[in-house]
Amino acid sequence: MDHELRYPLTELTDGSLLRLCDAQGRAVVVFEGRVWITQENDLRDVTLDSGESFSIDRPGLTLVEALGPSKVMVLGVGETPASPQAMPSSFELHRRARLERSRAIGDTLAKAFGALRQWLALPPLRPTLRPAVQPLRMCTATH
């Protein structure tokens, strides 16, 4: 049974790094906490708080560092748009991340309940207990 989520929510501890290689065209969505993002050959430093997102717009290495306990998701957003106006908003990316996460969790729960239903449909494996019958003996008293 496959329990892997398509877009897993990644928990980062304070100071931990998430290394993304050649992630251009993907988006980092922050569900909880705060992260710092830097891209190879880019002078910008981006910090994101809970509910915000950032579209990675450069090839090469991208580092996401947690500035406290954080939960992030990396989404594929398709091809990089030609103009900044065509980029999805932070709200749209966050909404898309929640939908994908909910769909993946729902699929996993459906598989688990299906397996449980099959298991419950099996005949019981316990032996049937029958009371031991002892023959009745007549006892006579002798003095």
Image (cartoon, rainbow, N blue to C red):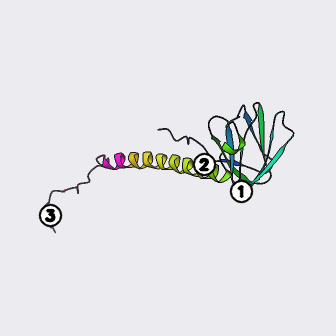
What amino acid is at disc 2? Ala
Q: Say which of marks 3 and 1 sits in front.
A: 1
Label total for image? 3
**Residue, x 84% and y 33% (percent of image)?**
41
Look at the image and give the residue range highlighted in magenta.
Answer: 117-135
Distance CA(mark 1)–CA(mark 2) = 13 Å
Could you say which is closer to the camera, residue 16 or residue 124? Answer: 16
Lower position in the chain sequence, tag 3 or tag 1: 1
Could you say which is closer to the camera, residue 111 or residue 126? Answer: 111
Residue 130 lies in magenta, yes or no?
yes
What amino acid is at disc 3? Cys
What amino acid is at disc 1? Ser
Lower position in the chain sequence, tag 1 or tag 2: 1
Q: Main structural element of the magenta stretch: helix, strand or loop?
A: loop
Q: Residues within 10 Å of mark 1 (few under 14, many from 20)?
A: some
**Residue, x 40% and y 45% (percent of image)?**
115
Element at badge 1? loop
**Relative to 63, 31 lies left or right:** left
Instruction: Write down the residue under mark 3.
Output: 139
**Residue, x 55% and y 40% (percent of image)?**
4
Give percent across and percent down for residue 72.
68, 48
**Relative to 75, 111 lies left or right:** left
**Relative to 95, 25 lies left or right:** right
Residue 50 is labelled as: 1
Could you say which is closer to the camera, residue 43 or residue 122? Answer: 43
